[in-house]
Amino acid sequence: MPEIQCSRCGKTAEMMTENLFLGKMEQEIKEHVCQDCWNEWNRPGGVKTMVINEYHLNLGDESARNTLKQQMRAFFKLPDASVEFKDYRT
Ligand SMILES: [Zn+2]
């Protein structure tokens, strides 16, 4: 099982194998994000939900999907993240 270093928490972890349904970003996320951080983003009521609510995103809109992707890059601290992630949960 290949191991990755998570860009968000810095831990070394096994690469996720489940399908994340991310299309073009799937491989990039799997190479940079550990399961725990992914769960924090993706679980019901998690960070993704927070971002959708906070920015009033209608995911039928392409611009909304792009905003969500940018926030996801920022949350996971991917190398080319172009926006700041603001945690509204605290
Ligand atoms: Zn992590």
Image (cartoon, rainbow, N blue to C red):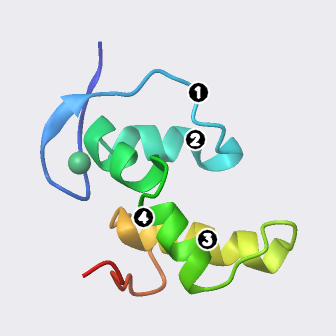
Residue type at the position of mark 4: Val
Q: Nearer the viewer, mark 3 or mark 2?
A: 3
Tag of residue 68: 3
Q: Is residue 79 visible?
A: no
Query: How many angstroms separate mark 1 from mark 2 (CA)?
Result: 8 Å
Among the two numbered marks 1 and 3 on one chain, the one whose residue lies closer to the N terminus = 1
Q: Nearer the viewer, residue 90 or 2?
A: 90
Query: How many angstroms separate mark 1 from mark 3 (CA)?
Result: 19 Å
In this view, 68 is above or below 32: below
Q: Is residue 38 visible?
A: yes
71 left or right of 59 in image: left
Query: How many angstroms separate mark 1 from mark 4 (CA)?
Result: 19 Å
Q: Nearer the viewer, mark 1 or mark 2?
A: 1
Q: Nearer the viewer, residue 52 or 77?
A: 52
The C terminus, quarter of image = bottom left
Query: How many angstroms separate mark 4 from mark 2 (CA)?
Result: 18 Å
Which residue is most to the left? Answer: 11
In this view, 32 is above or below 57: above
Pointer 4 and pointer 3: residues touching (CB < 8 Å)? Answer: no
Residue 23 position, x and y percent, is: 70, 43
Q: Nearer the viewer, mark 1 or mark 4?
A: 4
Query: How many angstroms separate mark 4 from mark 3 (CA)?
Result: 11 Å
Kindly identify which residue carries mark 2. 26
- Mark 3 element type: helix
Residue at the spot 57% in from the left edge and 36% down from the top edge: 20
Kindly identify which residue carries mark 1. 19
Pointer 4 and pointer 2: residues touching (CB < 8 Å)? Answer: no
Residue at the spot 53% in from the left edge and 64% down from the top edge: 49
Pointer 1 and pointer 2: residues touching (CB < 8 Å)? Answer: yes
Q: Nearer the viewer, mark 4 or mark 2?
A: 4
